[in-house]
Amino acid sequence: MSLNRTSDDQTVSQAYIGLGSNLNDPVSQVRRAFDELAGLPSSRLLAYSSLYRSAPLGRIDQPDFINAVARIETALPPYDLLKALLDIEHGHGRVRDYVNAPRTLDLDILTYGDLRCNGDCLILPHPRMHQRAFVLQPLSEIAPDFRIPGLGAIAELLATCEGQQVEREKNK
């Protein structure tokens, strides 16, 4: 795991967070989530991408999504970070009626340092991120040379997502 130490001897990691919304003014939902990520305890928002519009995958009878990726530095352990993200989703009114349902906000830990794990409620790196242009395009904007642990370079992975329409929104 890529870890650094802060001056108070806390373990710190960089994590990438995927953001998505397709209900209740998705642009505002994602922008508000950036502010909430900046306010996470023992964490710091380092960068975030532009907003991107994408058609839904899987269940296509729903509105388009607004997606983005953020990079944070955090001393929260992975499961504590996951809980904090779920709390933010809940604050946005996220309801999990069924798989791939429309949502007010979806926050996914994409990577946490170079940690690889396969837990009951947390798999890292995110198991489908390398197949989704709506994740890879914004990720490549803020980390063009990033390599997904165990999967490879973003540019190479993005080339395999041909046919997935992802459009940058005019306003960040």
Image (cartoon, rainbow, N blue to C red):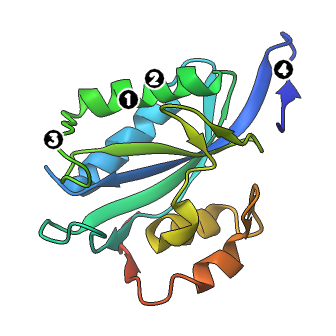
Disc number at residue 6? 4
Q: CA distance from mark 2 to mark 4?
A: 23 Å
Q: Amino acid at mark 2?
A: Lys
Q: Nearer the viewer, mark 4 or mark 1?
A: 1
The residue identified by callout 2 is 83
Question: Going from the N terminus, do you reach mark 4 or mark 1 first?
Answer: 4
Give me the C-alpha separation between circle 4 and circle 3.
Answer: 41 Å
Label 2: few (<14), some (14–19) or many (≥20) C-alpha neighbours in 10 Å: few
Tell me if label 4 and label 3 are in contact, CB under 8 Å.
Answer: no
- Front disc: 2 or 3: 3
> Which residue: 45% across, 24% down?
84
Q: Which residue is mark 3?
A: 97
Q: Residues within 10 Å of mark 3 (few under 14, many from 20)?
A: few
State if disc 2 and disc 1 touch (CB < 8 Å). yes
Find residue 86 and name its label.
1
Give how far across and how far down residue 97 sits, in percent.
15, 41
**Label 4 vs 3, first from the N-terminus:** 4
Q: Residue at x 48, y 74 (%)?
A: 133
Q: Nearer the viewer, mark 2 or mark 4?
A: 2
Along the line of sight, which residue is nearer the eye, 139 or 58?
58
Task: Give left or right: position of 84 versus 81.
Answer: left
SS class, disc 1: helix
- Give the crowd class for mark 4: few <14, some 14-19, many >=20 residues within 10 Å: few
Q: Position of residue 99 (x, y in %)?
A: 25, 50
Q: Position of residue 91 (x, y in %)?
A: 25, 27
